Image (cartoon, rainbow, N blue to C red):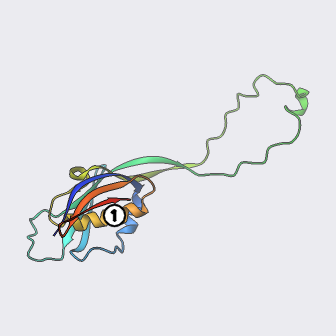
Amino acid sequence: MSHVYRLHSTLELPLEEVYDFFEDPDLPEEIEDVDITRRNNTLIISAVSTDESISKYTPTAQLKASVTENRVYEEIEEEEADDGPLGTPNTGGGPQWGAFEEEEEEPPSELVEYACFKGDRETVLQNSTLQYAMFEVLCEIALIAEKGTLTAITATDGDLNAARI
């Protein structure tokens, strides 16, 4: 019997990567599939049990993430700087009023939705049925996350384990 005692997560990754991960996931044997639901800015990933003795009305473990939009800037190579004298040819090399009025162009960017698995066990990993199996799924997500950490204290067959990803 396995159990998750403590968990703290600050994981963030693009929402598209979460969907890609669950297209062909390597799920623990207790989980047949997952249901992914989005309600406003909340993503809920629920376990579907392989054990038919678990009633369809029994709430199985679920991962919960908030969905936020972040602006991601594309990196562009800077153009080579002029090696000539300061100023323009018609200024004689001195400063000119209005020369700094020209605004820098904002680098190209796009809004990307991120799934943020942030919080403690009750916030990120809910319900006890199949909880440890869904914790294993969360560990797999942590391995592909762009930033953040996952720390947990679990028990497997009576042995305590600490995890930090």
The single residue placed furthest to the front in the displayed view is 159
Which amino acid type is shown beneath numbered disc 1?
Cys
Q: Residue at x 24, y 77 (%)?
A: 29
- Given residues 70 and 124, the one toward you in this image is 124
Image location of residue 74, percent across then percent down: 59, 52
Q: Is residue 49 left or right of residue 138?
A: left
How many numbered badges does the structure rendering display?
Answer: 1
The residue wearing badge 1 is 139
- Given residues 22 and 148, the one toward you in this image is 148
Name above or below for residue 17 compared with residue 96.
Answer: below
- Given residues 136 and 100, the one toward you in this image is 136
Disc 1 packing (10 Å; few <14; some 14–19; many ≥20): some
Name above or below for residue 72 compared with residue 30.
Answer: above
Name above or below for residue 122 compared with residue 30.
Answer: above
Q: Quadrant of the C terminus?
A: bottom left
- Given residues 154 and 12, the one toward you in this image is 154
Image location of residue 45, percent across then percent down: 26, 61
Name above or below for residue 81 compared with residue 18.
Answer: above
Residue 33 lies in what quarter of the image? Answer: bottom left
At numbered mark 1, what does the secondary structure look like: helix, strand or loop?
A: helix
Q: Is residue 52 left or right of residue 109?
A: left
Image location of residue 147, percent across then percent down: 44, 53
Q: Quadrant of the N terminus?
A: bottom left
Image location of residue 113, percent across then percent down: 41, 52
Q: Residue at x 71, y 48 (%)?
A: 78
The single residue placed furthest to the top in the displayed view is 97
